[in-house]
Image (cartoon, rainbow, N blue to C red):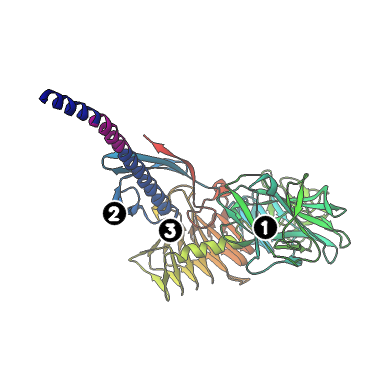
Amino acid sequence: MITVVLFFVFISLTILIGVVTPVVREFKIASDNFDSKQSYFNAESGAEDMVYRIKNNMGSGTIGEDRVLFLSDSFVPIPTLLTDLGGGRKQIITTGEVNESERKVGLTLTTSTGVSFNYGVLVGQGGITLTGSGRVNGNVYANGPITGDSSAIITGTAISANGPIPSSDQTNGSGVPALNVNFGNSSSTEDIAQSFRVSSSNFLSKVQIFIKKVSTPGNVTVKIMNDSSGSIGTTVIATGTLSASSVTSSYGWVDVSFTASPFLESSKTYWLVIDSGVLSTKYYTIGATGGDGYTRGISKIGKLGKTMNNVVPTGSDYFFNIFIGGVEGSITGSSGSQWNQLHVGTVSGSAQAHTVNYTNAGGDIYCKSGTGNNKDCIDQPDPTYISYPVSEANIAEWKTDASSGGTYSGNYAVGWAGATIGPKIITGNLTISGGGTLVVSGTVWVKGNLSLSGGGLIKLAPSYGTNDGVVVVDGTVTISGGGHADGSGVEGSYLMLLSLSESLTNAISVSGGAGAVIVYAPYGAISVVGGASLKEATGYRLLIDGGSTITYESGLTNNNFSSGPSGSWSIDEWEESE
């Protein structure tokens, strides 16, 4: 009996162990798998937190250190390794560990394509005046006249476009759109089109589109095309580029200029077409009315050259603006002097405008008429209007970025002791003097005026690296008395001082000093005198005098602002790391 009982117990234990062991093993595997997944989620959370801090320029003190995040109802330490790979690239490796189960996530950030300044000087309808040995080392493009005295020099190409004072002839949409139409995210929504008819025959100047983007789509082509029995024809009348850097993640009006200014007839229908590619995760959204909108055209979406369908509901139309009109541009030197007031192309540059007078060009002179030049005019179509590189949407996003750091009420003065600020809104004036240094650690929006004088310095924080930063000023900007502005100290880093003042004499005034700075005044005048030196100037009007120089640098063709619209960082690679 005892033997039977022992045998039965042995058999039972064997069966029990055979049943329990796999259960315990599966439980252990499930537990390890859960810990492993939790470790991976923690590592990813750490990586996302790091990306957020870098994109929002939250300071080097919080980057590259072990940080503690509140995850799963507990505080979790996440060791992080940040490596600068150079060339505008950073590598992040974060480690998550739960119950000795360790997982790592590695990702690479790269600076996205930013605002491009393709000319040493880009000026609006106010034009350019160079006197007293004023000099531009680089190319000049003006949407108005270029004038100067015999001592003025431009070492590159000088172009005076048809300088439009454009008028809005056809417009649709305002406020918050009733419809948000995505395009460029599938083959059936790759392209969009809007037909229109101008009220009076005239030359096309530019178009505006109310648009935003999802993630980081690329540039797209904008076309003006003919109409064929109520459908899009096959003739491309004008072509332009919608720059991705001018579009932000929030709605804004963005300008598009064209390589030609076609004459539009009021009796004909035309199509405004945005010809995009397809990428499901990176695309654009355009605002539209929800029916009974624009009465002089219709909207379409689909694939250009194949199937284009009406936007639903019927009668919906995109938000757009068509500008027409303009005046002839001119380049003029000192009357009666063969050595013109605008010395164009001392090496190989050319001069181009509708009218070129008293100009000594190293390259060819392209014009419809001219007198007193060193070369005869070569007949060529007039140059066309080109848009500013920074859009209204860009500026709005910079202001939003500044607001993330709160508001400083009143005037902000920086003396010899120096200060660090940003991101921040300053409701009053910003003054830097007495040899003081202001370090900009994030986007700053000054609602008053900015004054930099008395040997004062404003510069970007070292954390900007090779990237660029911006100070937006609602009022005027004055740099004088040895005032200096600079980037982060790393080659290729620039600070942009952007004035929204409409003053036609001194929206931005620079008299001596300056540095690695871009000055930008889309609605007012930039005055550069007293031997000042800048890297790039863009404004409605530009006055250069007193031996001052603007020296264009090739790095400006791909500016990457560390915050706000185009700068930020994009994720190049994201994968588990060993």
* Residue 353 visible, this angle: no
**Marks 1/3: CA distance?**
28 Å
Q: Residue at x 60, y 62 (%)?
A: 251
Which badge, 1 or 3, is on the more N-terminal residue? 1
Quadrant location of residue 370? Answer: bottom right
Asked whether residue 517 is drawn in magenta, I would say: no
For the residue carrying disc 1, how many other residues have a C-alpha within 10 Å: few (<14), some (14-19), or many (20+)? some
Q: Is residue 8 left or right of residue 210?
A: left
Report the residue marked by disc 1: 387
Quadrant where the N terminus sits is top left
Which badge, 3 or 2, is on the more N-terminal residue? 2
What range is drawn magenta here? 16-29
**Marks 1/2: CA distance?**
52 Å
Q: In the rendering, at what x and y percent does residue 289 appear?
A: 70, 65
Q: Is residue 114 left or right of residue 483?
A: right
- Most common secondary structure along the magenta stretch: helix
Q: Nearer the viewer, residue 540 or 108?
A: 108
Q: Nearer the viewer, residue 46 or 428?
A: 46
Looking at the rendered structure, the kind of residue marked 1 is: Ser
**Marks 3/2: CA distance?**
40 Å
Which badge, 1 or 2, is on the more N-terminal residue? 2
**Mark drawn on residue 185:** none
**Mark drawn on residue 459:** 3
- Tell me whether circle 1 and circle 2 mark residues in contact (CB < 8 Å): no
- Tell me whether circle 3 and circle 2 mark residues in contact (CB < 8 Å): no
Asked whether residue 21 is drawn in magenta, I would say: yes
Q: Residue at x 31, y 35 (%)?
A: 26
Mark 3 residue element? strand
- In front of the other: label 1 or label 3? 1
Report the residue marked by disc 2: 74
For the residue carrying disc 3, how many other residues have a C-alpha within 10 Å: few (<14), some (14-19), or many (20+)? many
